[in-house]
Amino acid sequence: MVLTNEERRKKMLHDVKSWYEDAIRDLVKANECIKLGWNSDSCFYSQQAAEKIIKAFLRSKGVIARGHKLESLLKRSEAYGLEAGDILEDARRLSDQYMAPRYPNFREERGIKLENYTEDFANRCLRTARIIWEKVLNQIKNMITE
């Protein structure tokens, strides 16, 4: 089935909004987990919020992105006008939070222990996610209010 231009535009808007809404939920979960003292879970949800908001941005440009490495997604986003050079190193560290909080063998390979997940570390992960969030939101806010 071939979609019309209008149908493609509506599908893209739907996809952007869906990624955005999922990102919001993950950002809220990250914040709530810190309050509960679940710092490793907060780091995971911070990574997820950042990944999903970047994917919302890329979808707004007609790109269907795959993968979990935030620095790669951000570098790809730069080609579409998202300024991310100042956050790439923090994004690289946040990318590890996709696996490390959930898999002991991954933590072991990276030299990370659960006791490394302090409230301060969780807040740094959340801060990185929020910086990425703000950069993207400035680019897609018109689309998510349509």
Image (cartoon, grey):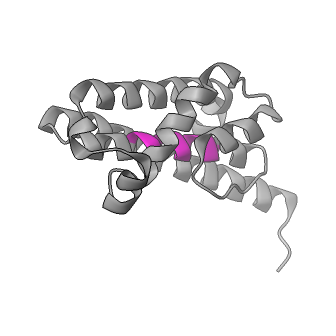
Q: Nearer the viewer, residue 107 or 74?
A: 107
The image quarter containing residue 138 is top right
**Residue 44: percent from left, percent from top:** 37, 47
Q: Residue furthest bottom?
A: 1
Q: Residue furthest left?
A: 36
Q: How many marks?
A: 0
Q: Is residue 59 left or right of residue 131?
A: right
Residue depicted at 67% across the width and 43% down the height: 73
Q: Nearer the viewer, residue 136 or 69?
A: 69
Question: Magenta stretch containing residue 55, yes or no?
Answer: yes
**Residue 9: percent from left, percent from top:** 77, 53
The image quarter containing residue 143 is top right
Residue depicted at 36% across the width and 54% down the height: 108
Question: Magenta stretch containing residue 113, yes or no?
Answer: no
For residue 86, say whether it is visible.
yes
Q: Which residues are magenta?
A: 46-56
Where's the C terminus, which quadrant?
Answer: top right
Location of residue 123 with respect to 17 vertically, above or below: above
Location of residue 15 with respect to 114 vertically, above or below: below
Q: Is residue 117 left or right of residue 5?
A: left
Q: Residue furthest top?
A: 86
Where's the N terminus, which quadrant?
Answer: bottom right
Residue depicted at 62% across the width and 57% down the height: 67
Location of residue 21 with respect to 8 vertically, above or below: above
Q: Is residue 10 left or right of residue 107?
A: right
Residue depicted at 27% across the width and 23% down the height: 120
**Residue 37: percent from left, percent from top:** 15, 37
For residue 103, say whether it is visible.
no
Q: Main secondary structure of the magenta part?
A: helix
